[in-house]
Image (cartoon, coloured by chain):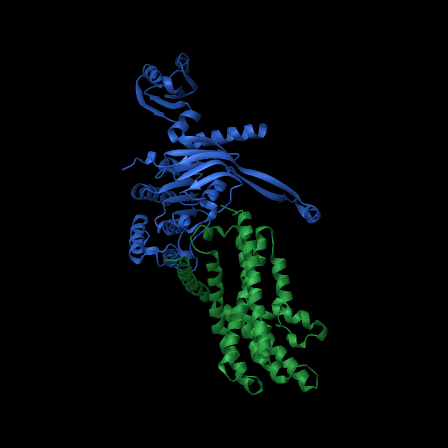
Chain colours: A blue, B green
């Protein structure tokens, strides 16, 4: 069997660019009148020469603040949008050609848009997909049974979609998207608006789909728990540019090269005793608890020094929370962007 | 499975689902159809009164009666309500969820139109049946099945013509923020030029050349004329030729504009 990394990538993008043209209209009647006579058109660069490739079976998180260009990227990859320039090949197809052979091998789930008919049971939509994707009855029945069991939605298949909860609807959306067994699944905010239980269910289902079927998954989400639970690799897009492409661990190391340390002692600690510690910053002492940030390379030595400060009750060493890292990263870039 | 058969199955499935979804609103259908048949009946009564009062018209009472009795049915059968919905789908980015699936986008539109016709037929046919029975003695009823067959063909072509005009207008939503004014303008122009308000036979003599050859005649008036009027064989053939020609021309233009529009589609929203 050929190792996955020796196979050609299923997605290959080179200098992918997308611009939008739109007209500006000022608020109010005056603005509307001016707009009637003379319109000012502007071009916005949504995606700016990004290049990347994704291998079969990878689960990749596409991250970025609102308006960064990640959904536009997803739309180009799924064939909804034409690229303005650059090369894009997905499963050896140019997505915007929207060839049957391409569309039957992918699926796109948009958290805020539905694929399901609202007034009839989800089974009607699934049967439509059976016809659209040319599935045999045996194949369809097998897939429906497997997906319904994984998602625990057997009892919902014959209920009008509009009578299901948001979490149940998302599970049914995922089922409709996967019933034909796509090789690539594009997900745009799949857990938006869901409660914690539903989010966990969706995440574990997606992990199962990737593991059992080898489905390549590209996901955008603002929920870092989604990303941590599913993605071995993340791509950060901001201002249309690809700012980072690598493992989640690499991102943490690059963006936050310090470990967060929290030591709790049996008795209160005097702050003066911490002044001599090397490779630490953001030291905070509250009674018997010491919080600080330690250089990754010196973490071992810092731990050793901390044990000498007194009888330890608890010692906790962790990487910065990915949510905090992303917030700092986006804030930093936004400030830089504003400054420039 | 070839693409045609697959799309045919998709249309069948979508039509059935559309009917299931829309039959929820059965009361609305009956009201729609009452409105659809009211105007022809009122017009019929007005024109019959005018004739009875000695008005000199280029057509007789039998023509006027047959025309207006059939008008409600033909208007319904060849109409399309798609332009507004489609334009909104384009503007709001709702087209996206269909574009990522491997079926012709046309399938959804066709299914929507077919389901609409199916449901309207249920509401409209009994109403027309009653009107027909009331005026049965003063109508032109063709003897053989030939005219009825041509009538059916002409209705299908008329429906296709309206459908392609609708796609053409809705496609402009790829570039324009709002096409509702255009949709409304088309409705007003078509209601006059199709013969839905006044039979085209009653239009002034000086407008004959234009009225007889403009496309809207072939969406309503021409199918009705096949039954109600005394079109000669050559007029019939020429009319069907024009109708088919308009379908091909509008379909070609709609296809070009649609293809260009898809390139400009911005898939608004997440």
The single residue placed furthest to the bottom in the displayed view is B137
In terms of depth relative to the viewer, which is nearer, A228 or B129?
A: B129
In terms of depth relative to the viewer, which is nearer, A262 or A164?
A: A164
Q: Position of residue B154 (x, y in %)?
A: 53, 72
Q: Residue at x 54, y 54 (%)?
A: B258
Quadrant of the rendered image containing residue A338: top right
In terms of depth relative to the viewer, which is nearer, A188 or A134?
A: A134
Q: Is residue A215 above or below residue A293?
A: below
Q: Is residue A190 above or below residue A144?
A: above
Quadrant of the rendered image containing residue A222: top left
**Image quarter hosting the N terminus of chain A:** top left
Q: Is residue A189 visible?
A: no
Q: Does B128 sit left or right of B217 as displayed?
A: left
Q: Position of residue B125 (x, y in %)?
A: 50, 76
Q: Is residue A323 visible?
A: yes
The single residue placed furthest to the right in the displayed view is B206
In terms of depth relative to the viewer, which is nearer, A11 or B114?
A: A11
**Image quarter hosting the C terminus of chain A:** top right
Count of number-bearing discs: 0
Q: Position of residue A138 (x, y in %)?
A: 28, 56
Q: Residue at x 49, y 60 (%)?
A: B109
The single residue placed furthest to the front in the displayed view is B234
Q: Is residue B101 above or below residue B136?
A: above
Quadrant of the rendered image containing residue B181: bottom right
The single residue placed furthest to the top in the displayed view is A276
Q: Is residue A122 above or below residue B48?
A: above
Q: Residue at x 65, y 74 (%)?
A: B200
């Amino acid at each position: 069997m050929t190792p996955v990394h020796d196979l050609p990538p299923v997605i290959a993008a080179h200098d992918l660019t997308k611009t939008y043209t739109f007209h500006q209209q000022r608020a109010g009647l005056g603005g509307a009148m001016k707009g009637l006579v003379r319109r000012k058109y502007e071009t916005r660069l949504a995606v700016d020469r990004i290049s990347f490739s994704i291998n079969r079976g990878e689960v990749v998180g596409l991250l970025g603040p609102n308006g960064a260009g990640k959904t536009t990227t997803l739309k180009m990859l799924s064939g909804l949008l034409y690229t303005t320039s650059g090369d894009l090949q997905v499963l050896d197809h140019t997505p915007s050609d929207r060839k049957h052979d391409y569309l039957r091998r992918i699926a796109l789930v948009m958290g805020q848009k539905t694929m399901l008919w609202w007034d009839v049971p989800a089974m009607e939509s699934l049967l439509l997909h059976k016809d659209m994707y040319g599935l045999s009855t045996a194949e369809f029945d097998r897939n429906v049974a497997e997906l319904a069991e994984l998602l625990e939605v057997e009892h919902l298949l014959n209920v009008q979609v509009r009578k299901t909860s948001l979490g149940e609807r998302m599970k049914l959306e995922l089922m409709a998207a996967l019933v034909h067994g796509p090789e690539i699944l594009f997900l745009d905010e799949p857990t938006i608006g869901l409660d914690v239980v539903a989010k966990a269910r969706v995440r574990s289902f997606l992990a199962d789909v990737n593991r059992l079927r080898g489905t390549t998954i590209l996901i955008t989400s603002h929920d870092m728990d989604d990303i941590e639970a599913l993605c071995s690799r993340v791509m950060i897009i901001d201002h249309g540019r690809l700012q980072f492409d690598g493992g989640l661990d690499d991102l943490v190391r690059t963006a936050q090269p310090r470990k967060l340390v929290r030591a709790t002692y049996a008795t209160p600690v005097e702050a003066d005793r911490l002044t001599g510690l090397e490779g630490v910053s953001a030291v905070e002492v509250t009674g018997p608890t010491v919080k600080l940030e330690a250089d990754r390379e010196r973490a071992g030595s810092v731990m050793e020094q901390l044990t000498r400060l007194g009888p330890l009750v608890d010692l906790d060493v962790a990487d910065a929370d990915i949510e905090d890292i992303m917030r700092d990263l986006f804030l930093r870039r936004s400030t830089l962007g504003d400054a420039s | 499975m070839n693409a045609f058969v697959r799309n045919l199955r998709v249309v069948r499935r979508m039509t059935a689902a559309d009917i299931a979804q829309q039959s929820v609103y059965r009361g609305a259908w009956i009201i729609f159809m009452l409105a659809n048949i009211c105007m022809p009946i009122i017009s019929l009564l007005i024109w019959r009164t005018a004739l009875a009062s000695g008005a000199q018209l280029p057509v007789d009472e039998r023509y006027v009666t047959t025309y207006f009795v059939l008008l409600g049915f033909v208007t319904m059968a060849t109409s399309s309500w798609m332009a507004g919905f489609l334009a909104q789908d384009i503007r709001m980015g709702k087209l996206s969820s269909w574009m990522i699936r491997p079926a012709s986008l046309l399938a959804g539109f066709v299914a929507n139109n077919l389901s609409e016709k199916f449901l309207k037929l249920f509401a409209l046919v009994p109403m027309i049946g009653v009107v027909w029975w009331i005026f049965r003695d003063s109508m032109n009823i063709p003897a053989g099945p030939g005219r009825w067959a041509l009538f059916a063909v002409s209705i299908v072509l008329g429906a296709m013509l309206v459908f392609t005009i609708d796609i053409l207008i809705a496609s402009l939503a790829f570039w324009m923020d709002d096409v509702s004014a255009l949709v409304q303008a088309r409705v007003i122009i078509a209601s006059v030029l199709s013969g839905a308000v006044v039979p085209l036979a009653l239009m002034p003599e000086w407008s004959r050349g234009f009225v007889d050859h403009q496309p809207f005649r072939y969406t309503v008036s021409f199918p009705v004329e096949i039954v109600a009027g005394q079109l000669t064989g050559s007029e019939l053939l020429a009319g069907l030729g024009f109708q088919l020609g308009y379908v091909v021309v509008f379909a070609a233009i709609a296809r070009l504009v649609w293809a260009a529009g898809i390139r400009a589609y911005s898939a608004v929203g997440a």
